[in-house]
Amino acid sequence: MWKRVGLLLALVHVFSASSSHAASSLAPREEGTKVVLAVLPFEVSDPARMTYLQEAVMDLLSSRLEGHGGIKVVEKYLVREAVGDAAGRALAEQRVQEVGKKLAADYVVLGSITKVGTDYSLDVKVWNVRAASTAGRVYSLARGDDAIVLKIQEVADKIAKIVGAPPPPPPAPAREGATPVAPEGPGPAIAEIQIQGAKEGEEDAILHSLTSRVGEPFLEGNLERDIRKVLERPDVRDVEVRVTDRPTGRVLTYRITRGRGPKATVSVPQRERVAEVRVTGNQRVETESVRGKISMQPGDPFTAKVAQEDVRDIYKMGFFRDVQLDVQSTEQGKIVTFIVAENPVVRSLNYAGNRHVKKDKLDEILTIKPNQTLDFRKLYESQQRIQSYYSQSGYYLATVKYSLLQVDENSVAVTFNVTEGNKLKLKRIDFVGNKAFGDRTLKGEMKTKEWDLPSKVLSHINQRGIYREPIFYEDLNKVHEYYLDHGYLRADVGEPEVTHEKKWLYVKVPIEEGVPYKVAKVDLKGDEFLDKVEARKRFKLKSGKTFNRALMTGDIDYLTKKYTNRGFFYASVTPLTDVDDAKKTVDITYDVTKGKLVYFEDIEVVGNTKTRDDVIRRELQVAEGELYNATGVEGSKGRVKALGFFEDVSVNTRVGSTENQLDLTVGVKERPTGSFSFGAGFSSVDKFIFAAQVQQQNLFGRGQQIALSADIGGRRNDVNFRWTDPYVRGSLWAISVNAFVDNREFNDFTRSGQGGSLTVGRSIGDYTRIFAGYSYEQQSVSELGFDATSLLIREDIRGGARTSSFNPSISRDTRDDRIDPKKGTLFSLSLQSAGMGGDNRFTKMEGRATWWFPIKLFPWESTIAFNARAGGAKARNTLEDFKLKEPTTTVGTKTFPPVTIGGITFPGWSEPIPVPSSISFQQGGSAETDKTFPLSIIDSDQLLPVTERFYLGGLNSVRGFKARSLGPRRAILTRIPISGVAGIPDGTTQYAVADLNGNGIIDRDETEVIGGNKYALFNLEYQFPLNKKMGLGGLFFFDGGQAFAEGDPIRLGDLRYSGGAGVRWRSPFGPLRFEWGFPLQRQEGEESSVFEFSVGSSF
């Protein structure tokens, strides 16, 4: 069969050669507007036909893609040089990206051919080099040898749709009077090329350098060029070529003579050489610009093929409506003249019939521009862009045509005539023939959605409910993948049938399911040292299970990484399948090709104009002289990017001085790391704020961080200084110094503090760090309200306290971004032991675990984030530390004098002083009205300082509740006696647990949250983009948490829950948060919803 493919390829090349000159009659095509594709050699699972299949499929697919007119395929020999020894092997996405960039391609086409019984499965992946992501996939099953040629044509058509390449525009009339050049006639197809006298390992390189190829027609002009290429090789003195005709075709034998001395020359008669190259007919286009596209030069042997290629290259400039070739023979050689006729200039662009789309919007999507030379390729592309825009906006029946109006001899006016039709919505998608999976299941695999209620809003954002053909074909590929992932090897998803009725579109998709196949056997070969038993244990696809293509791909990735992480850079794993249609089973053999061990030779850092090399190198997980490690290379890129110093980070590899050595280049693009900012704002918690900050994240290019900030507002006044060196003198040790002054006003008191800290840390592995620090803080509580809880009154009486503490901690951080992570984890555990000569004595421990998961359930990229935190503290203070007087033990009567408040005099009274047995009151508890007793026996179990207790509620804990509103509550105390406005408590008088409502109950409004000595909370978020360019994202959240008092255990049943939504903006001023929460099972006195906003990251 593959001989028939080779014959077909020969016919394709014969046709191409014989019609080359006809290119001059086509509308011009600009090089820059063609989609450039690089077709890589496919993986082939049939070892007996591997080489031939790779060559045949690569050539046939390339010729079919070139036939689309809007596609330029990179020459095969360039592809071979770029891929090197990895030709025909599975390539990592990073390597595919490198190859695409090296070849200056827009897209890279790669894939595999898997022999499934007598059939062949084609799995093709289209890689978008500019976006560095997969543009689409194409799957096709050729039933038998004869069907593969037709399937390759289908594959080429689908690839053209994915990359958006249009068919060629209609031909224009050829210019009269020019002398045509007869095409160089092809000879018989080349059956074999032999190289004699080549060194060991040199034969493949010589074959790759030749223009002549097996299966292609024999051309005399190529022969001379090939001889010159061989002579260019070192120590080759002479080359002789023998041409032999056989029944199968021509055999070319190159005999190489080695030695020193002058090179042999290829003799061509002077009359057959090019004497002069001329360009005529151009008026606005510079002659030198045209000459730059002509490869034929004076002194070269003249061949019609080269001349025809030059004609096509001149056309690709897009400036000419006609290019003719005139060749005159003289004694001095041939005079070659390229006669060009320039296109007119576009004087104006106009539209007709565009009622629903404004002219400005259409102007934005056009590639043709006024006052430029008319380019028919851009004209056709602009027409298709307008058509596509209307189609994707719901005007599926819209048609767009263009007309040219001659303004004068050298200019035209272009008008796009639009017939819009009605705006159509996708009413229904029907699958026909699906029995194993329902329509709802299959639709769940698709980006395209039917019109529904959310479409009224989302259709303006993401085109929900609109039929878009390129996206729909991607969806069909996903449906086919779904069947393959459930064992349906013979499933076939047919072409969609689209119909319309009034304002609705209907799509019908035929499916032939077949039956699911079981895996009969899984085996490995190719590496005798591989532990097959251990490998099979790690495989997801096992004998007896239903075949699953995704699991097989995962097993291939596992095996490939097993080798590439141990130095086998060129390792590849090919799945060989043997399908038994009678038994409905498939045998899978993973064929391992290890290749050679590869070591890192040189590691180079480029692009860092400010940051020192050692700052970047210390983040790398690979080193010179070590074995290649694919995971290490990927991790190095992530660690360098996570520094936050660079706009872009790239990691590229190239072959070193020998085949088993590899050079690694880490490329960075610096971005500003220093900033000075100031501004004013309003926070829902802190009210009016004036903020100023000066910081440098990369001080002197050494990676050190320094910052000085001040926040001054109605309820907070903070000044903070911090300096950090994450790698002291290039070691694994880090040091950080911090000093601060803060003053913060809460609803019922004001807290003031000043202090500093010194922290030392060390890296353990790539992501883990341990820290040990000392901190000192002087703090006080003041400005209590008329009524306050016992804890606040104690702190006020105390007159300030010192906290001296030792603070060890450990953290593990694998986030991909410190500010807006999309994947990774963050775990931390910290301990604070206070005492060490200070007034406050306690031990506090807190832990945190956060995960970020990227998900692809929807057309847009989104993230699930889950955060869990818990903590506890144990006080080591006693009541004596608060300077309180002991309670009286005798029961007596106290008389209170009259009191005047606001001009009103209240009569005096007297009451007994009881010694109560209960000293704490909980919400809903009962108490006698206005009972009084000394402060030292009220809430005596609450010994942890107010400033060290845990309060929940608010933007950074449980949203939907006001800040510091969740936690245990205690009764508000009222000072007795009242003397005018209550003075500062001194601990010598009595305090009343006041029943202000007079109902015999201490109600909720007669208590305050005092904070707990332990807490637990969680946050669950679904994050999604709203506008990537602006850095705008949205989220939905579900929170839960509660703080608990001493003596109370943490009970999950007592957690309070909330839900809500928010918007986050990664603004130039820092990350901004706007979030609206709703408490679930709201209690009396709580707000029905809470809206909050602030500057800072989440969690």
Image: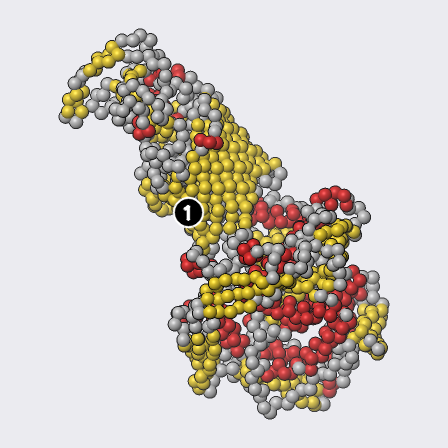
Instruction: Kindly identify which residue carries mark 1.
Output: 1062
Nearer the observer, 438 or 588: 438
Q: Is 768 placed left or right of 5 in the picture?
A: left
Nearer the observer, 422 or 620: 422
**Residue 44 seen in render:** no
Q: Residue at x 61, y 47 (%)?
A: 636
Residue 681 point in image, percent of width and height: 34, 45
Nearer the observer, 515 or 1083: 515
Q: Is the residue 1088 above or below the residue 580 in the image?
A: above
Q: Residue at x 52, y 31 (%)?
A: 830
What amino acid does circle 1 point to? Gly
Residue 149 point in image, percent of width and height: 70, 70
Q: Residue at x 63, y 71 (%)?
A: 65
**Based on the displayed image, in which of its 4 quarters is residue 282 positioned?**
bottom right
> Residue extending furthest bottom?
177
**In what quadrant of the picture does the N terminus appear?**
bottom right
Residue 985 point in image, percent of width and height: 29, 21
What secondary structure is marked by label 1? strand
Q: Is the residue 534 above or below the residue 950 in the image?
A: below
Crowd band around label 1 with a 10 angstrom C-alpha radius: few (<14), some (14–19), many (20+): some
Q: Is 814 placed left or right of 484 in the picture?
A: left
**Residue 415 seen in render:** yes
Q: Is 115 placed left or right of 425 in the picture?
A: right
Nearer the observer, 435 or 858: 435
